[in-house]
Every structure is written in structure tokens, then in C-alpha cells.
Image (cartoon, helix red, strand yellow):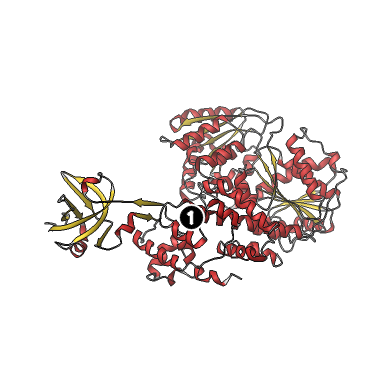
Amino acid sequence: MRPDVLNPLFAETDTLEGVGPKLKKPLGKLGLTRIRDVAYHLPERFVSRRAVETIDEAGEGENIVVRLTVTEHRGGRSPRAPYQVLAQDSIGNVLTITYFGRASYTAKKQLPVGETRWVAGKLERYGDMLQIVHPDHIVEEGGDTLQRLCEPVYRLSEGLTQPRIAGLVTQALARCPELPEWIEPTQVAKEDWPAWRDAMQLAHKGEHKAARDRLAYDELLANSLALMLVRADNRKRKGQPLVGNGSYRGKLELPFPLTGAQKRSIAEIEGDMAQEAPMLRLLQGDVGAGKTVVALEAMLIAVEAGAQAALLAPTEILARQHYESLRRMAEPTGAQVALLTGRDKGKVREATLMGMLDGSIDIIVGTHAIFQEKVAYRNLAMVVIDEQHRFGVGQRLMLASKGKRAPHVLAMTATPIPRTLTLAQYGELDVSKLDELPPGRQSIDTVVMGQDKLPALVERLAAQISEGRQAYWVCPMVREMDGPEDIAAAEARYASLKERFGDDVVMVHGQLTPELKDAAMQRFASGQAKLLVATTVIEVGVDVPNATLMVIEQAERFGLAQLHQLRGRVGRGSQKSFCVLLHGETLSETAQKRLSLMRETQDGFLLAEEDLRLRGGGELLGTRQSGDTPFTIASFEQITELLPMAHDDARLLMERDGGLEGKRGEAARTLLYLFERDFGVKTLRGG
């Protein structure tokens, strides 16, 4: 249950004064549906003003606060003409306060002739007059303008104004309760951080680094703690210790000897599987680093120990590909590999389900279908999940309920993730890294060119096709997911290439039905089609060794990690491969750096670290174009700086301070509920 002390924060925004259905909508657009969200809606920046005695002290373009006496009103002669109020400072300098449109009404009310007022706004010159247009504030003597020397600027949506949102924030802050301290006391003292409630107030008042850092740290601590609770819960579960005898693995006939990184990862996995606590390990490998071989070795350990293994892939196409390559590799060992997807029907499906139940199938490959209610195993003890970021913590927990006892889980990803983000996303997993490319992998020549070279590129493509090779053409990403604009761009490009290459061209995008998508991919994979035009749906795992050219249009719209993934689709055979990055006319500095990095290196881990530096995270973990982290308050710099500290702090709480029991534990429980990471608490109550 959520602690009572937090209830005021989780009340809906319409409990704030002045919020009715009309305001609820723009607030909802900003994700502000509860008091908590409004309080955490931190300013994007602050406007600073300087209080001056006279206008002479101020510079043009400066934000100032000055005491003025009103001398005259000059009404707009026509409705379009500005309304002007003349006023003098303490030594008689004249300043015009200018209003446009209907604001003259306000001017008459707020600036009566002969009265003195504090006026805040930006000092500008118009002809030979100094003026302030639409002042930010006008306050009577003894008012609070001097308190407004530093003012927050908030992110808005249509229908909201700065004063409006500032008023709501003030109300939300007034409802913030005092909360117990969940951060380790020496840490608070060392960083000189304010208490939670004070930090909330200060973060809205000015550039208060300590307050902002404290609030970011809270969020990072909540995340680390939740993931550790999941992990501790996993350790308490009983798994099945699996020890192989090499009888199957000894018969493998691999085309290349294993790299050092593969041997090291296999040894780490073997060590985990021999324990009773179920393995939770992430295998990170760059495109083409040989993750499948490592996964097969791991699954064969389970088979040698008399159990079954399953490989879960995010899409049907990938499941099919994994099945083909695993079956081929496992053939000499005698291990039985089968495929089960949602599309299998009738007798074939029945036979597969029987084989899983009676144990005659050793390794099953498939999509989510392999974990449906009706699917039963004789003894499933090991699961490999491909492309981990498509499965959240929730699903990882769900898997654990499928075997008689919790199965060992190996998650694989081809997205190299920098260490900080690995902690953020996968804090509950141990990590193995494949950081060497196997022998036989070709380097890919990367060329950057402008859109104007398109005709020459099409000729080059024609030459490739006439030599019997295949190519990909990836169209720009206009929005996060394949939206209508993306598809329009892909369809236009497809139409123009089809005029030239006819039936040799196929197209895939996210809005096609799975059947159509699969059919097009199948034509390309089998070599019937020579050119595949696609939106970004092809980034993960497609394997066509005969494809030697990758064209990425408007490459500047993609993040480094994604460009690297796409480039990894070629260079899988023995032929020399190329990647062409086509860019538009204007390139931002970041885009230029990104494209030149792509030219210089093929090391995915290096590119991921650089990507992080260039723009804060981006789609390292998915496809979002920026800031795709599980965090809303912590900025990228804060994640990099504070996450390792938060991670250690969470570990201290778990290992030394008694977890969620005890005084600090109670406070930490409040923190988990405040950030809605309470799935961590739930694992304690029976998972």
C-alpha cells in the first residue's frame, strides 16, 4: 500500500484551485495529471533581472526592475496603434511603457498618472526612445517585485501561460509534505544537499544546483533500489543447478574458432547456471560479434543436464532466422531444435507441442507464443531472450513463472550500451560483453555524401545488382515510430526505384500486416528480390550474407547507435561491403560529428559512449531520438555523474542497512512509491 503521507501528492490536478476541465487538457498534454507531477515540473531555465536606481545604469536588452512615476497616457489613435504610457525614473529620465492590442485596458488600471510603480521588463530602444514593451510585472510600492528578480520559465502546452503554471506549481508545492530522509546521511552531508521538501521549493526558485541534483539523485536511487529488489528476489527463488558434461558441445563443428570474448562469456554463463539461484545475465555484443554461438553453448549445457531450453525472439522473422542457424549448428550434436510461432496451425503445431511436453524437443525457438498459457514443457530450465530492450522488467518476471522452478535467463542485445545506462536499464542483471569481432568479418567502407549525388548512387546500385548482389535502402525517420510521413517517404522512394528496377524491389514498413512484411522479407532473404526499401523496421537481426550495400537516406536524422545497427546488416558474407550515408543540405554540428564518427570507427561500444556524450542517450535503448532513459527528472549529465553513487547507496541499504526494514528502509519504501517503482516492493510480498 502507498504510505498515507504521499496521498496529497497523488491527488488529481483538478483538486488545485482554478483547474477545471478546460485546464486539465493542456496539463494532461504535459503529463501533469497529479499534484506530484506539477510539483516535479521543474523550470527549463530562469529569467534574471537586475534592480536599477535609474535607467542610465541599465544596458539595452537587459531585464531590469526600476521604480517609475507615471506622467502621461497616450491612447492609440487607431485600434492598431500602440498604447503608450510615459514615466520618469528618480532623476527625470523618460521611459515609454508600450502596449499593443487590447492591453490598454490593463495599462489604465495598473499605471494611474501621478503614481509610483515598480516595473519589471526588458529595456529596449525604439528610434530615440527607450521603452519597455508589455512589462512582465507592475507592482505598487512595497510590493514583491524585488522578490521576482529571478523567475522560472516552464515548459508549456497550448492553453497555458507562464503565470498560470507558476501559480499551480506554488499550490502544488504548498501540499508537499515533510518526508523522512532516504539518502545515506553521510552522502547528504558530503554533497550539502537540502532535505526533500526544501529541495522541491528551491529547484523552482533559481539555479540551485544542489537542489536539482538532490531531486535527480532521488529518482536514480529509486530506480537502482527497485532493480536490486527484483534481483534479490530472484536470488531467493529456487532454480535448477545445471551442469553439463560436454557430450553435446564436444560435437559442435563451428566455422571459426571461438574468440577470447566468447570463451570468457561462456565461462561466466556456465558458472551462473551451475548455481541454484537462477541466472539473470545480459550478453552485450556488437553487431556480428557471435552472440548466437554463445547462446547455443548455453542452451546445450541445459540439454546435457537433462533439461530443455527456449529462445525467445521479438519478431517472427527473427525467430525463423535463429531457428535456421541454430538447427544448422546443432545438427552434428544430435540436439533436437524446433520452431513455434503464433502462425503454426493444425498438425504441425500439435506435433511441436507434444514434443515439448514429452521432452523429445530439446531446444524450442519462437516468439511470445512459446510462453502462452496452453504451452507446457517437460522441464524448461533455461531461457534466452533476444533483443532485451523489447522486454521490460515485468515480462522478465513473468518468464520466471513458466518452468517448474525459475529458469536461468540469458538476455542478449546487439545494442552496445554504455556502462551508466546498463546500470539504469539492467541494474538487476549481470553483464557479459563480446567486444571482439570473430575472424572472417569484413570491415565495411562507410561513405558520406549529399542528396545531390543520388543519380550516381543509383547507377552504382544498378552495377551491384547486375553482379548478382543485393542491397538495402533505408528511408528517413520522420517521427519516433513509423508514422504516416515515414511511410510516405518510403513509398515515394520505392516508387522511383521500382521504375528503374521493376520487380527486383520490395518494400517493408511498420504499418504493413505481419504476413505482407514477412512475404517481402522472405523474397529478399531468398534472393528473389535484389533491393529492399524499408523504414527502420529492419534494424535488428536480419541476416542476408549476399547483401553488400546499405544506403541510409537523411542519415542525419538517426542516432549513432541506430546508424551502427543498420550498417551491421551488410558485411555478413565474404564480399566487400559498403554503407552510404546520404544527408540533406544543412547539417547541425552534432550531425556532422555523428556522420564523421561513423566513417572513422566500427566499434559499437565506442560509438555508444560517443553518442551518449553528443546528445544525451538517445535511442541507445530503443528508437527514441533523445533522452530515452527511464528517467524524467535526472538529466543526462546527472545520470552520468550520480547514477554510480545511487547504485552504491542502494546496495548499502540492501546489504548493510537491512533493506526495507528499519528506519531508513521505511523511508526508502516511501521513495519507491513516490517514483512509482513499487514493483520493487511487490517482489517482497511474494513476487
Vertical position of residue 403 compared to residue 22: above or below: above
496 sits to left or right of 393: left
Pointer 1: residues within 10 angstroms few (<14), some, or many (20+)?
A: many
Residue 176: image location, x then y, percent: 48, 66
How far across and how far down the image is residue 635, in percent?
51, 49
Residue 533 can be seen, yes or no = no
Percent x, y of residue 173: 44, 65
Q: Quadrant of the N terminus?
A: bottom right
Looking at the picture, tell me which residue is in the foreground, 502 or 167.
167
Q: Which residue is mark 1?
A: 211
- Res. 335 in view: yes
Give, as a three-letter code, the residue at label 1: Ala
Name the quarter where the C terminus is drawn. Answer: bottom right
Depicted 379 relative to depicted 609: above or below = below
- In the picture, measured across the screen, residue 352 lies left or right of residue 677, that is right
Pinpoint residue 305: horizontal percent, then vertical percent.
Answer: 86, 50
Above or below for 302 versus 610: below
Examine the image and state in which quarter residue 414 appears.
top right
